[in-house]
Image: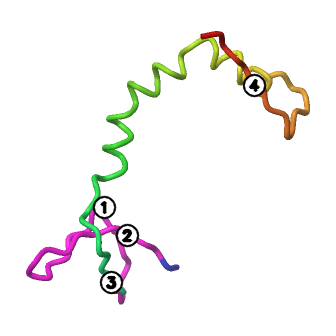
Amino acid sequence: MIRTVEAVIDEQGQVRLLEAVQLSAPRRALVTILEEEPAEPAHETALLSEPALAEGWSRPQEDAAWSYLGSGKQNAGRFLVRRESA
């Protein structure tokens, strides 16, 4: 099985995996060096954005907009568009 694991390579060429890897035996690996700087780990970004997203998701307008998903009706391809007055 081929797996992709994110890693950071420092100026001395030392490779540091950003997640734990369990292997039953030594394995070969290919390393692709990307041009951009290492990004913040995705889970940290998700945790930092959670309060802002929760605020938007908790609005009554969101509940109304997505209520058809729990109605048991076949609504494939239909979208509810709500316009609010300014």
State which mark lies toward you, 4 or 1: 4
Lower position in the chain sequence, tag 3 or tag 2: 2
State which mark lies toward you, 3 or 4: 4
Q: Residues within 10 Å of mark 4 (few under 14, many from 20)?
A: few
Q: Quadrant of residue 13?
A: bottom left
Lower position in the chain sequence, tag 3 or tag 1: 1
Lower position in the chain sequence, tag 4 or tag 1: 1
- Direction from residue 18 to residue 50 in the image, left or right: right
Measured in 3D between alpha carbons, the distance from the residue under mark 4 to the one under mark 1, in whole angstroms, is: 41 Å
- Dot label at residue 31: 3
Q: Residues within 10 Å of mark 1 (few under 14, many from 20)?
A: few
- Direction from residue 74 to residue 68 in the image, left or right: left
- Dot label at residue 5: 2
Q: Residue at x 77, y 28 (%)?
A: 69
Kind of residue at badge 3 = Val
Kind of residue at badge 2 = Val
Lower position in the chain sequence, tag 3 or tag 4: 3
State which mark lies toward you, 4 or 2: 4
Where is residue 40? Give x, y as percent.
28, 52
Residue extending furthest right? 74
Disc 1 target residue: 19
Q: Residue at x 79, y 32 (%)?
A: 79
Q: Quadrant of residue 18?
A: bottom left
Where is residue 63? Give x, y as percent.
66, 17
- Direction from residue 84 to residue 55 in the image, left or right: left
Kind of residue at badge 4 = Val
Query: Is residue 17 found inside the magenta-colored segment of the image?
Result: yes
Where is residue 17? Give x, y as percent.
26, 68
Disc 4 target residue: 81
The one nearer the camera, 53 or 74, is 53
Measured in 3D between alpha carbons, the distance from the residue under mark 2 to the one under mark 1, in whole angstroms, is: 7 Å
